[in-house]
Amino acid sequence: MLSVKRALLMSVGERYVLLVMNFISAAFISRILTPQEIGVSVIGMAILAIALSIREFSSSSFLIQRKELSREDIRGAFTVTFILTGSIAAALVAASPFLASFYNEPNLVPYFRVISVCLFVDASFTLITALLRREMRFGKIAAIDIAGAVTNCAATIGLALAGFSYMSFAWAWLIGSGIAAGLAFALCPHFWMFRPSLANWRGMISFGGYNGAIAILFRMFDALPLLLLGRFVSPNAAALFSRTLWIGQIPDKLVIGGAIAVVLPAFSAEARQGRDLKRPYLSALSLITALHWPALLVLSVLAYPTVDIVLGHQWTEVAPLVQIVAIALLFSFSFELNYPVMVAMGAIRDLFIRALIVFPFSGILLSLAIVFGGLQAAAWCLLMTVPFQAYLALSFVRRRLGLSRRDIAAALWKSAVVAFASAVPPLAAIGVSGSGFYLSTMEAIIAGCLALGGWAAGLIITRHPLLNEIIKISPALRRARVSVG
């Protein structure tokens, strides 16, 4: 348990650094480039996300969850990964003229040529980080990821200022991946991985078949609104929706992003030792929602000043969309936990069945909303698709873990109270200000501080489990608790 907590702290620390880099990059780029320019990269990355899902047929999760891992397994995974990467890169370059014509965006051709090279650089160290995760060596992973992120951020801003426009994203990715790959092999010089091998490929394909199919369905659904908006509305609309999702997912990245890197190895280790995953799953839900729900509610209330501070005035259209999306994402609290717990239990087939139901149905609804309603309809549609996905996902997990609805409610009710306590102060501040949601920067900071006070009060009043975890890692709070006792 101590090793898991130490790994969790390292991973969360790493994610905070990455989030800061992401913030800095987005804040500068959103002021340097126009939404139209950023839209080119958004469309390109959406297409790339679908293509990259094919690589999940040689998923690194196979190496993490496998009980006994040999060098042949690792070499086999590396070989299959490179074969798939080569196929994807070749397909992207060959299809780029057609894609450019389809979106009436000729700039996609040079964009995909550079991106295809990035894929090989990324593939060269992806499995190394998977092995480090299996061994819970998150300090080295943090060093690799942070070095790549800092380089990518600096390169993106520098290239944008130098006039590289949408190509800033592609060239910066190549530079950042090169730095990360070099550091990965310096810290973990497993050059024997490059020796081709297809040993034990059946087990890999058996796992990767379902995992790859799930990834394809998920990536297609994830990229669908951006691709449809880019085709039927404009690249500008795709950029606006992309920034909406980015702002809306900040709480996910801030709260869950750091933890999720540790969850799969931790759950897999528990499963290998034959332990029950019900209790740690419920505990994780309770802790995550005590952070995730308050952050989303406060973000919805303070969407206008948040967008203004982070992205600038030219992105004001994003604010009302963020308010809608943040409410929809309240239902996504279990998403990042469901995959690792199901994989740890060997229920990858269940995940595939769930994906086969959820993503096509949600995709049809979203497509109809965009084609007939445009940008606003896409945001409102998430209020239907996200709760539907959450209900079905929890149904599969409940059946596997033997959970009742009462178990889940018992794990979540305190977090709901904490979230309400966090949202009330900023709502009151908006009522007092008289300017509605259009708070000034100073008013927004004061409202945020009040929300933090409400959150702390909610934790204390409900005696939330998160309060005990905070006290454990804070010597000052621990001493205060002892003195009060």
Image: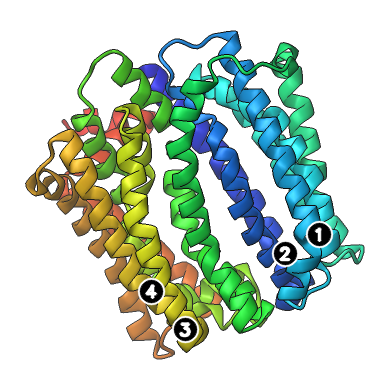
- Against 20, is 109 above or below? below
Q: For marks 2 and 1, give the CA distance.
A: 8 Å
As drawn, is 81 to the left or to the right of 460?
Answer: right
Disc 4 residue type? Leu
Q: Reading the chain from its start, which is encountered first: label 4 or label 2?
A: 2
Q: Residue at x 44, y 90 (%)?
A: 435
Does 71 sit above or below residue 168? above
Which callout, 2 or 1, points at the residue further toward the start of the chain?
A: 2
Q: Amino acid at mark 2?
A: Ser
Q: Farthest residue toward the bottom?
A: 434
Image-based side of 45 in relation to 481, left or right: right
In the picture of the structure, the residue carrying the numbered disc 1 is: 111
Where is residue 174? Give x, y as percent.
Answer: 80, 44
Q: Which residue in the protein does label 4 denote?
A: 365
- Residue at the farthest right position: 162
Say if 306 sits above or below 85 in the image.
below
Calculate the distance from the C-alpha at mark 1 to the C-alpha at mark 4. 31 Å
Where residue 281 appears, x then y in whole percent?
25, 35
Q: Nearer the viewer, residue 127 or 280?
A: 127
Chain-order first, disc 1 or disc 4: 1
Residue nearer the viewer, 378 or 485: 378
Q: Which residue is labeled 3 in the image?
A: 376
Q: Which residue is disc 2 drawn over?
A: 41
